[in-house]
């Protein structure tokens, strides 16, 4: 099948080319993000492959449909950037990669936490300037601290296991508790109110839905333990960034490690060093010494990239062969976002 790959980068082209030796599709890589303006580039392609920050709104999908596209293959787990109701109405099939490496994302969350706690980003910058002073670099032991994990899918449980290994007390929250699995790790499900009140560290591992949009807002941040460290490797809009800035300024939030940002789609995955940053909210966030931001790279391991390529191309092959699609998403099951 002919596939137009949008928003492609050097890090994902090789895994897809390598995997495609087994599948035999025709891949056309496009550097541009998929938007209403770039959708005409997919003219004549029955399948397009989209990344996390492509914008598949109703108008984009209409252009794709008119150009002959029948399949939207997402090389991501999240699908909040797709108007699923419009896709269904237009007769477009949408498939995704439901999981690629829970270890990659959980380990990155722990990396953010450790680097933030022990001021690694600041210490490294100092040493490069031959400043070997230790003032301002005091951290805290993770051992004995209470860590809250919001969202207990595979990534959340990997995170819980890792934090248990540090000797932390682990509290969990999910709409669908898995109490047996939690007990096996020595973790405990509690209410969000309890988790906010008791946790020194809170890590977010849940999808973006209408119900979870701005889950971490001014009210939630106010209810948290003073000096809490917040980690987000889920989706940017789980957190109200302006509210986060407010509570960083007062010290209610002691630190934030973020791999995602609510307005990242026109910023992340590109080099803006010669153009500057026009997003005033993100620019303000970057001024805090107790904030560590990475550009949506939690998934970026060799293992995860290989799994993403394999699953994506397998999804496309199953569609082309008319077989049942185990990784399909549609408006009949999920609300549009």
Image (cartoon, rainbow, N blue to C red):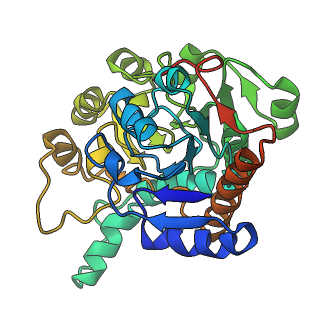
Q: Residue at x 35, y 61 (%)?
A: 137
Q: Residue at x 85, y 31 (%)?
A: 183
Tell me the quarter of the image containing the C terminus: top left
| Closer to us: 314 or 111 | 314
Can residue 111 be seen at all in this image of the molecule?
A: no
Can residue 225 be seen at all in this image of the molecule?
A: yes
Tell me the quarter of the image containing the N terminus: bottom right
Position above or below: 177 against 79: above
| Closer to us: 331 or 187 | 331
Q: Residue at x 26, y 75 (%)?
A: 126
Coordinates of residue 111 in the picture (x, y in percent): 53, 59
Coordinates of residue 122 in the picture (x, y in percent): 31, 65
Q: Does residue 33 appear to the left or right of 169 in the view shown?
A: left
Q: Does residue 53 appear to the left or right of 70 in the view shown?
A: left
Coordinates of residue 87 in the picture (x, y in percent): 51, 27
Position above or below: 114 against 213: below
| Closer to us: 133 or 327 | 327
Q: Residue at x 63, y 49 (%)?
A: 143
Q: Does residue 251 appear to the left or right of 108 in the view shown?
A: left
């Amino acid at each position: 099948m002919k596939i137009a790959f949008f928003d492609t980068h050097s890090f994902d082209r090789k895994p897809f080319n390598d995997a495609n030796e087994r599948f035999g599709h025709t891949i056309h890589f496009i550097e541009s993000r998929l938007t209403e303006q770039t959708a005409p580039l997919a003219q004549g392609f029955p399948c397009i492959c989209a990344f996390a920050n492509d914008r598949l709104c109703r108008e984009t999908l209409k252009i794709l449909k008119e150009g002959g596209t029948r399949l939207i293959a997402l090389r991501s787990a999240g699908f909040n950037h797709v108007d699923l109701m419009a896709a269904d109405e237009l007769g477009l099939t949408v498939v995704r990669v439901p999981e690629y490496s829970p270890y990659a994302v959980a380990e990155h969350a722990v990396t953010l936490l450790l680097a933030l706690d022990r001021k690694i980003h600041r210490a490294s910058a100092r040493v490069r300037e031959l400043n070997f002073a230790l003032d301002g670099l005091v951290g805290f032991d993770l051992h004995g601290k209470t860590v809250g994990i919001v969202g207990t899918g595979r990534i959340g449980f990997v995170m819980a296991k890792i934090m248990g290994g540090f000797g932390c007390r682990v509290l969990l929250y999910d709409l669908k508790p898995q109490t047996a699995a939690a007990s096996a790790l020595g973790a405990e499900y509690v209410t969000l109110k309890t988790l906010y009140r008791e946790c020194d560290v809170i890590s977010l591992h849940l999808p973006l839905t209408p119900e979870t949009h701005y889950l971490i807002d001014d009210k939630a941040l106010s209810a948290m333990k003073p000096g809490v460290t917040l980690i987000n490797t889920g989706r940017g809009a789980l957190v109200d960034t302006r509210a986060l800035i407010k509570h960083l300024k007062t010290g209610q939030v002691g630190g934030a490690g973020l791999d995602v940002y609510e307005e990242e789609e026109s910023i992340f995955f590109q080099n803006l060093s010669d153009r500057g940053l026009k997003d005033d909210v993100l620019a303000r966030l970057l001024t805090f010494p107790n904030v560590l931001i990475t550009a949506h790279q939690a998934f970026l391991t060799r293992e995860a990239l290989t799994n993403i390529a394999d699953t994506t191309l397998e999804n496309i092959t199953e569609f082309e062969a008319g077989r049942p699609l185990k990784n399909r998403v549609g408006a009949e099951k999920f609300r549009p976002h």
